[in-house]
Image: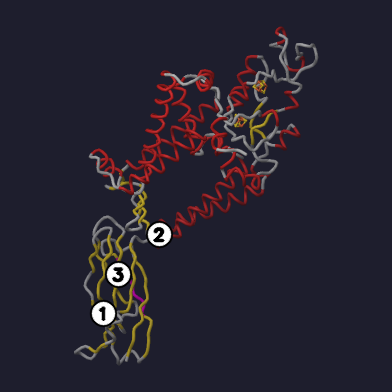
């Protein structure tokens, strides 16, 4: 049975590779990390651009303040993320895993650290197998120290998405970080170190749930990294003098016809999950394309066409056809249409959203009462939540004016806060019969009259 120790002992030492996909992967590492580490430091309109405040249950997003009442947008964002993942997986297979999954990105960074401190894979393998000595302790200790520092930084950054980042940094500098913040940073940092620094490819192979349910989203036109066995086999070392002749004339050392694969094994050596892509489609393949890069180099050196290992689909490989277009994939069109519709609806909703909320509740302690001039008053508790940064004034207006009027001055609510007011609705008993009436109330932001909300109140007449 596979144990954690077994995972660690079966460590893969991927060989460094260059190439176009490697450049794209590095670009993804840089972009995702710039976003992750940079966003909590970015201020927007005088406050942290992205932060979720647990105390007030508010999400601050580039000047927008979302409240629990705006849950619909969070739900829409989750649906878009899920549909996007389905669509992307159906089209591009495990491209997400190979290029932008946090596990891949952090593993890549940990391998950079390891390579920087301990040298290339061969040296690392030898050192790992050698008995402990001063040099090994120093190198391995330095690697772990750097990995732990980086992991802790990821943990602290995550805390910065929930607590003001600049305050957190100042508190950290003063050695005054809160217990929960410290625990949160240590837990997340610890997981980063464990998953990316220790377990690495074992997470993709044995723990990742996404890898398990991908099969349900794949079809025969899903993009994957594939070895062209029709072109590559029979594989084998090549006679030197034939190294640069065209593939059709390839001949092996034993003078038998030979495919394009020279059996150099480099595609296995660069693979971060340690598999041999020539054995066919395997669930351990994360689609990182390192084997494509290295095999292309081999093809260049042996004077053969690139693409012995390439991004393709099962269909295209079997029938040696070009990749299908989006139009030939109705399921992709349905997913794309749904995605676009939800994004358009959410964007419209957000654009039209009024940045304040109002609750009008009857004051149960005060039943309707008669004023000195013979009118009937109903008292309400009006709770206004201003989600903008600046103070705002609101005016209540009754839509059935003439029958009922509001007795309240403009209601001032400080920025980013909630205030309750007692407001009376006054009706003439000569015009409204006794019983319960629904009154429509219009609430206008006097500082921006385009912002209007409509609420209803129950009015009781004796
Ligand atoms: S890198 Fe290419 S040529 Fe070398 S073993 Fe792999 S498939 Fe064959
Ligand atoms: S087989 Fe190729 S694409 Fe798949 S994980 Fe290994 S190197 Fe990456």
Crowding at dot 3, Cα within 10 Å, few <14 / some 14-19 / many 20+, comes out as some
Given residues 324 and 203, the one toward you in this image is: 203
Q: In the image, is 174 to the left or to the right of 268?
A: left
Q: Which residue, given by chain and number where applicable, does mark 1 sit on?
A: 424
Q: Residue at x 75, y 11 (%)?
A: 253
Magenta stretch holds residue 395 = no
**Quadrant position of residue 35:** top left
Question: Does residue 176 appear in this view?
Answer: yes
Q: Position of residue 352 (x, y in %)?
A: 40, 59
Given residues 347 and 52, the one toward you in this image is: 52
Residue behind label 3 places its C-beta within 8 angstroms of ligand 2:
no
Q: Which residues are magenta?
A: 439-444
**Which residue in the rendered view is the most extreme toward the top?**
241
**Quadrant position of residue 360:** bottom left
Q: Main secondary structure of the magenta part?
A: strand
Crowding at dot 1, Cα within 10 Å, few <14 / some 14-19 / many 20+, comes out as many
Q: Closer to the N terminus: mark 2 or mark 1?
A: 2
Q: Which residue, given by chain and number where applicable, does mark 3 sit on?
A: 383
Question: Does residue 28 appear in this view?
Answer: no
């Amino acid at each position: 049975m596979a144990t954690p120790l077994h995972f660690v002992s079966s460590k893969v030492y991927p060989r460094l590779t260059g190439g176009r996909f490697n450049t794209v992967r590095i670009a993804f590492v840089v972009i995702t990390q710039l976003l992750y580490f940079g966003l909590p430091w970015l201020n927007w309109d005088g406050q942290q651009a992205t932060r979720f405040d647990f105390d007030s249950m508010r999400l601050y997003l580039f000047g927008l303040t979302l409240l629990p009442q705006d849950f619909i947008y969070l739900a829409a964002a989750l649906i878009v993320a899920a549909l996007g993942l389905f669509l992307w997986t159906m089209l591009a297979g495990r491209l997400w895993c190979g290029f932008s999954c946090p596990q891949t990105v952090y593993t890549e960074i940990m391998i950079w650290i390891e390579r920087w401190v301990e040298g290339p894979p061969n040296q690392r393998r030898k050192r790992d197998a050698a008995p402990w000595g001063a040099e090994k302790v120093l190198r391995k200790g330095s690697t772990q120290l750097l990995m732990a520092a980086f992991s802790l930084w990821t943990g602290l950054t995550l805390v910065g998405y929930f607590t003001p980042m600049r305050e957190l940094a100042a508190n950290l500098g003063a050695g005054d970080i809160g217990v929960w913040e410290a625990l949160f940073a240590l837990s997340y940092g610890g997981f980063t170190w464990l998953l990316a620094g220790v377990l690495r490819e074992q997470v993709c192979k044995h723990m990742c749930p996404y890898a398990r349910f991908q099969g349900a989203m794949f079809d025969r036109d899903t993009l994957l990294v594939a070895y062209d066995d029709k072109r590559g086999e029979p594989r084998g070392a090549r006679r030197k003098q034939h190294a640069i002749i065209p593939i059709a004339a390839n001949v092996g050392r034993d003078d038998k016809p030979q495919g394009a694969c020279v059996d150099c094994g480099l595609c296995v050596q660069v693979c971060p999950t340690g598999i041999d892509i020539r054995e066919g489609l395997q669930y351990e393949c994360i689609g990182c394309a390192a084997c494509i890069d290295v095999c292309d180099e081999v093809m260049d050196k042996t004077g053969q066409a690139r693409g012995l290992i390439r991004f393709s689909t099962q269909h295209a490989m079997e029938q040696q056809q070009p990749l299908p277009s989006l139009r030939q994939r109705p399921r992709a069109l349905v997913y794309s249409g749904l995605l676009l519709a939800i994004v358009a609806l959410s964007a419209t909703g957000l654009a039209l959203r009024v940045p304040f909320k109002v609750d009008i509740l009857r004051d149960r302690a005060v039943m309707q009462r008669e004023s000195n001039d013979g009118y009937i008053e109903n008292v309400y508790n009006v709770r206004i939540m201003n989600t903008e940064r600046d103070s705002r004034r609101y005016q209540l207006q009754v839509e059935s004016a003439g029958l009922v009027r509001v007795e309240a001055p403009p209601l001032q609510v400080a920025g980013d806060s909630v205030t309750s007011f007692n407001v009376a609705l006054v009706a003439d008993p000569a015009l409204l019969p006794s019983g319960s009436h629904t009154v429509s109330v219009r609430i206008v932001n006097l500082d921006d009259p385009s912002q209007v909300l409509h609420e209803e109140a129950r009015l009781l007449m004796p």
